[in-house]
Amino acid sequence: MARSENIYLIGLMGAGKTTVGRQLAKALKLPFYDSDKAIEETTGVDIATIFEFEGEAGFRDREQKMIHQLTQMQAIVLATGGGAILRDDNRQRLQENGFVVYLQCSVDRLLERTKRDTKRPLLQTENPRARLEQLLLLRDPWYRVCADYIVDTGRMSGKAVIKNILDQYAARAD
């Protein structure tokens, strides 16, 4: 199942992009990248610190540069940040350079998965549920426009999610 096309994972925080990405990369024997981790490694600070000092716009500028860099690579699996699809340039780069998979998940499951995570700046609010609902309302149309394939990570086991993505990925080679 050797392919040279990249796999890019998009979706809200907590949908499983990093977890699924690592498993896909392992199954395909490809390197795995996480755009948020790459930004942290490049800057030497965590995402929350970037948000604190540069705001969301500053972070999105850094994210766009990182997406540009990572989409120039070949034969990788990439977990993007949840808001990467907000910028036209990012969507275009993802769509032109790989197989884009939208990891869709219900707000209830996202809340369950992120409730103890204090490193997500956009969820540091009085009402995380309302914030996730707002983000989903805003981003879901962009995820859908950008995606080649959509899979619900809240309803399937991890193994089923991986199998579904691998089957769709392989079908594109035929």
Image: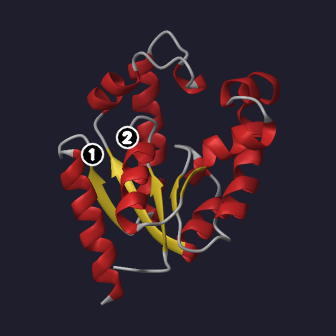
The one of 56 and 44 positioned closer to us in this rendering: 44
| Vertical order, 123 against 97 (above or below) | above
User: Mark 1: which amino acid?
Assistant: Thr
Give how far apart the Cα atoms at labels 1 and 2 are.
6 Å
Instruction: Please state which of residues 25 and 146 is positioned toward the viewer in this rendering.
Output: 25
Residue positioned most to the top: 126
**Residue 32 appears at what percent x and percent y?**
52, 56
Q: Residue at x 18, y 45 (%)?
A: 157
Q: Nearer the viewer, residue 127 or 37?
A: 37
In this picture, residue 41 sits left or right of residue 132? right
Residue at the extreme bottom of the image, as rendered: 174
Q: In terms of image quadrants, where is residue 48?
A: top right
Choose top left, top right, bottom left or bottom right for residue 27: bottom left
Q: Secondary structure at mark 2?
A: loop
Q: Position of residue 45 (x, y in %)?
A: 75, 29
Task: Report crowding for label 1: few under 14, some 14 to 19, many 20 or more residues within 10 A (C-alpha).
Answer: many
Q: Position of residue 117 (x, y in %)?
A: 47, 20
Q: Is residue 18 above or below residue 129?
A: below
Left or right? Give the position of 33 relative to 56.
left
Image quadrant for the N terminus? bottom left
Residue at the spot x=41%, y=22% of the render?
Answer: 130
Task: Return the mark for residue 174.
Answer: none
Q: Quadrant of the C terminus?
A: bottom left
Element marked by disc 1:
loop
Q: Which residue is mark 1?
A: 153
Question: Residue at the spot x=63%, y=41% of the render?
Answer: 37
Say which label, 1 or 2, has the lower sequence index: 2
Q: Are marks 1 and 2 in contact (CB under 8 Å)?
A: yes
Q: On the image, numbered disc 2 is attached to which residue?
A: 15
Residue drawn at (49%, 9%) of the image: 126
